Amino acid sequence: MNPPENRIESTLLRRINERRLLEAIQQHGPSSRAALTRVSGLTAPTVSKAVDALLKRGLVEELDPVTPALGRPGRLVRMAAETATVLGVVIDAKVCCVVATGLDGRVTEERTRRFESPGDYEGLLDGIAGACRGLLGEGGAPLLGIGVSVPGLVNERLQEIVVSPNLHLLDKRNPARDLSGRLGCSAVLVQETDGLCLAERLYGDARGLADFAMLDVSAGLGLGVMSGGDLLKGHSGMAGEVGHITVVPDGIRCGCGNRGCLETLATDAALTRLCSEREGRQLDVAEVVGLLADRPDAFVAEVETVTTYLAVAIAAVINIFNPTALFVHGTLLAGSPERFARVLEAVRQRTLTASLADCTIRATRSSKRQGAVAGIIRQITQGWAPTIR
């Protein structure tokens, strides 16, 4: 009989191999067992055993190839789309949403529920829990967990949101923990820009990249950095807060309490505020999109201001972190090829030439819904076993 320590080591090694295959399928998409043997470096018998174990636990599924090869084609293994469900929750200042999907991370409007963000924390939890129960009540595979994407500074040591400058009802809270208690399932808190990083690596143009950065310039200015395949966290998980660097000492008050922060001048929210001042009425982002399309000459100064400060933010990230790619998530500048081209021209004037030469800059293809989903999928993958790099 094998001694207990040998049985423990054998079980751990088996789980490590299973995690390696999960990560390979996430990075390469649906793959045959032969392909997984090649990309994982594991032996064919080990791959076969690991796939069988993951199939049994409902984490992966098998399907027939779309185009059968000559002879008897091998079946493809993919992340479970039909046999497992995860929920992604996006908490934002204006609108919250909940999406249901499989471990493949495919987000659809049919399985998304939105509601206006309530003015109090309990109302927020009620709205999210109701949307979650509604989606789960429509049937489907067993729920494996919930990813909760939040704006603000998340202290991972304390497991709470230290401050959310644009949604203060989240300050000192952990909605993932509170939702877990209400719904009786695992939930993980995901800082929204970290979630965008994870989503871009799983589903977007950062597949296969170990070093890249993500700037979210929508409501606030958040930075996520992937370094060596891991998110750069810092001591308490709050690294990357470039949005609260002071750029105008006597500037307007930021949601963090200080004045002249970069996020007050380099974001969609900043351009919306400036255009609102120009029009003499409160606008939202959708209205600004329309005005910039219909009357672009009326807002040249406002666009130029935000372009300049966004270029400063991008240049700072490239100069400090030297990423292979930088992705920008936003609507008003990043979402317009013409305006984004002007941003990139301004970046060239403010970035170290050598650092910029090694970096591509592009608008992101990922969404915060995908970020919330990617957060819980990462938790499931990491919780399966430790990794060996």
Image (spheres, grey):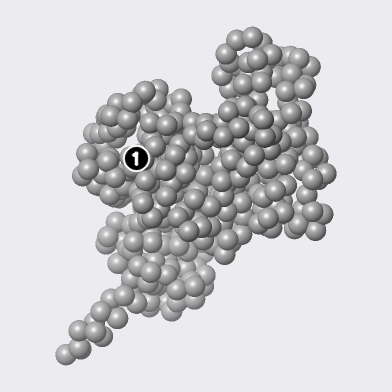
Is 162 rendered above or below residue 236? above
Q: Residues within 10 Å of mark 1 (few under 14, many from 20)?
A: some
Q: Position of residue 174 (x, y in %)?
A: 34, 42
Secondary element under disc 1, as helix, strand or loop, is: loop
The structure residue drawn at horizontal position 27% and vertical position 41%, both measured from the top left corner, is 178
The structure residue drawn at horizontal position 26% and vertical position 44%, both measured from the top left corner, is 180
Q: Quadrant of the N terminus?
A: bottom left
Pick the front one: 119 or 125: 119
Q: Is residue 360 visible?
A: yes
Q: Position of residue 286 (x, y in %)?
A: 58, 20
**Amino acid at the residue labelled 1:** Arg
- Spot the residue most to the front: 250
Is 248 rendered above or below residue 213? above
Classify residue 21 by image quadrant: bottom left
Classify residue 122 by image quadrant: top left
Classify residue 285 by image quadrant: top right
Q: How many marks?
A: 1
Q: Position of residue 382 (x, y in %)?
A: 38, 61
- Spot the residue most to the left: 1
- Spot the residue most to the top: 280
Q: Position of residue 108 (x, y in %)?
A: 44, 35
The structure residue drawn at horizontal position 56% and vertical position 31%, both measured from the top left corner, is 254
The structure residue drawn at horizontal position 52% and vertical position 33%, both measured from the top left corner, is 257
Instruction: Judge from the rendering whether residue 341 lies leftward or rightward of residue 158; answer left or right.
Output: right
Q: Is residue 218 visible?
A: no
Is 170 rendered above or below residue 324? above
Pick the front one: 146 or 246: 246
From the image, tell me which residue sits under label 1.
Answer: 173
Is 263 rendered above or below residue 314? above
